[in-house]
Image: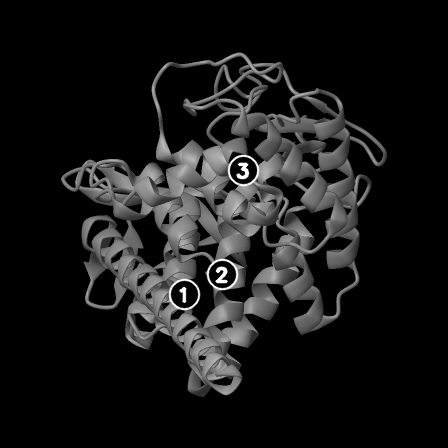
Amino acid sequence: MMKHAKLVWAFTAVVTVVYIAALLCIRAGSTTNIQHQHYQHWREHYVMYRNEHQAYVNTSNDRTAPVALSEGQGYGLYLTALAGAKGWAERQDYDDLLNYYLAHREATGDAHDKPTYLMQWRQHEADGAWVSQHNSATDGDLFIAFSLEKASKVWPKRSEYYTNLERKLTADILTYEYNDTTHTLTVGDWADEHSDYYNLMRTSDVIPTFFDAFYASFHDGRWLTVKNSMLDRMVDLSDSHTTGLIPDFAWVTASAAQPVKGNTVATKDDAAYSSNACRIPLMLASSDDTRANVVVRKLLDFFEGQGTITAGYSLDGTRLNDYESNSFTAPLVYAADINRQYGYTSLLMHRQELLTESLQTDNYYDATLTTMAVMGDNH
């Protein structure tokens, strides 16, 4: 009798293990299918071609009046490298986007005659011509560089070429987009020491996993300096409000940070948790640095109590708008998923919506941040 009971318990245990394993496999398979669908839909609606070998990400939400931004190009290259690792994108898909970046590199100097490996920040149609505007944007350059880091591992036969480009681009970021007094990245090559914006920091440019990767690849200690300085400034900003909310832009010194005023750089919401700062959970959540974790969890604690997440908040927690936006929700869901051991039940309820709803086809920013959150490296 005792032997029979032991056999029953053993059989039950085996069945339970198999059942749980099957559920995990189904969940993993389902998530993989959703990731694939999101990437394919994103590529179908937002990637356009200038010619046979140059592709760009259209950020205008209007295919008849396209606009390319270095930010969008960086995101496109990053997503394509992630897709390539899963077998959903070919090397040529990546190279077509890379060729467009290389054809629109920034040049410095008064006559714009000194080529760099930074990307010019914007291209659009004007009087029947495709016009490229000078100046760089650091967020785009960072994502282009990190995509090359990923691509060198996804397509090893092309690794030397990608790594060489990454080396040149990261070197130029530190040459033209780095403040050696505050030890932080500037917002672009135009915000140099002769500019009123030299001490300006875009808070969503703080991406410690990128900085770690660049240091590991090229052993330039300035990347660790950048990481430490920018994370310290993020902690300063987070600590200055009980909400933990961080502004789109901040003025920084070597030892402190404070929010800018509205309309300092881009919009009236420059001083708010708005269209730039909403990316912060995406940029910090996968870091193993304690400072990044503290900043992210404080944001998650605030939004966990919000219920509905709307587009933009003043730093005291006041809603700026009454409509929802995936560019705000998706990064928080991504971060909550990484930090699910701390709870965040309310935020995680949004995850299923994010995974199952159709990708927006007329909102580049929402669709792209959603796709990045769904395909993020933690999945």
Mark 2: which secondary structure? loop
Q: Position of residue 45 (x, y in %)?
A: 20, 49
Q: Which residue is mark 1?
A: 82
Mark 3: which secondary structure? loop
Residue contact between numbered discs 2 and 1, judged by CB atoms under 8 Å: yes
Q: Is residue 241 left or right of residue 115?
A: right
Mark 1: which secondary structure? helix
Q: Position of residue 355 (x, y in %)?
A: 31, 48
Residue that protrudes farthest toward the front in the picture: 1
Depth check: 147 or 10 in front? 10
- Reply above or below: 308 against 89: above
Q: Position of residue 312 (x, y in %)?
A: 47, 21
Which quadrant would residue 230 be assigned to in this image? top right
Q: Which residue is mark 2?
A: 377
- Reply above or below: 306 against 12: above
Q: Which residue is mark 3?
A: 344
